[in-house]
Image (cartoon, helix red, strand yellow):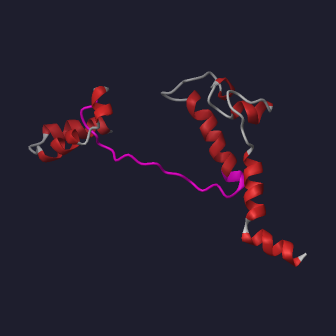
């Protein structure tokens, strides 16, 4: 989509926007041969409050290196930087993984709602 956008802009009678897109390229991007910066860099994070949502995101992250243009590993367990090995086999890869359920349970235990429930007991 970015290449199509740049091609259309270069084929038009305007130069202001293509020049702006060229000036937006970082030194790192330029060193890799990048000529235009079409997209604004962003990081879309999601707050994982439930186990279901957390596992949905884990499944996506585990499968991402094995699909599409990435193809970094034949399966999620084979990708060295993935926590999939821990969730599937219980064995850690190159680093120790803390199970998402432990994190969520600890968060729930520290929540004001939990403190209120404990006080009611």
Quadrant for the N terminus in the image: top left
Of residue 62 and residue 83, the one placed in the foreground of this image is 83
> In the displayed structure, does residue 47 sit left or right of residue 99?
left
Tell me the quarter of the picture where residue 5 sits.
Answer: top left
Number of numbered discs present?
A: 0
> Can you give x and y, in whole percent of width and height, for residue 20 in the image?
19, 45
Tell me the quarter of the picture where residue 11 sits.
Answer: top left
Quadrant for the C terminus in the image: bottom right
Q: Is residue 76 magenta?
A: no
> In the displayed structure, does residue 107 sit left or right of residue 3?
right
Tell me the quarter of the picture where residue 87 sits.
Answer: top right
Identify the magenta region.
Answer: 34-53
> Can you give x and y, in whole percent of width and height, for residue 118 in the image?
85, 72
Q: Residue at x 71, y 52 (%)?
A: 52
Q: Is residue 35 magenta?
A: yes
Q: Residue at x 67, y 27 (%)?
A: 94
94 in relation to 102, above or below? above
> Can you give x and y, in whole percent of width and height, for residue 60 in the image?
61, 40
> Can you give x and y, in whole percent of width and height, for residue 88 in the image?
76, 33
96 in relation to 112, above or below? above
Q: Residue at x 77, y 56 (%)?
A: 105
Q: Dominant secondary structure of the magenta stretch?
A: loop
> In the displayed structure, does residue 66 sit left or right of residue 32?
right
> In the displayed structure, does residue 78 sit left or right of residue 6?
right
As drawn, which residue projects farthest toward the bottom? 120
């Amino acid at each position: 989509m970015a290449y199509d956008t740049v091609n259309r802009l270069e084929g038009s009678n305007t130069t202001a926007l293509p020049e702006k897109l060229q000036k937006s390229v970082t030194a790192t991007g330029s060193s890799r041969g990048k000529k235009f910066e079409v997209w604004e860099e962003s990081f879309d994070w999601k707050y994982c409050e439930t186990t279901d949502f957390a596992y949905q995101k884990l499944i996506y992250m585990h499968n991402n290196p094995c699909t599409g243009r990435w193809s970094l590993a034949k399966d999620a367990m084979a990708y060295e930087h993935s926590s999939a090995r821990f969730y599937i086999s219980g064995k850690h890869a190159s680093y120790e993984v803390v199970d998402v359920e432990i994190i969520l349970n600890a968060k729930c235990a520290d929540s004001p709602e939990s403190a209120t429930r404990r006080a009611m007991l």
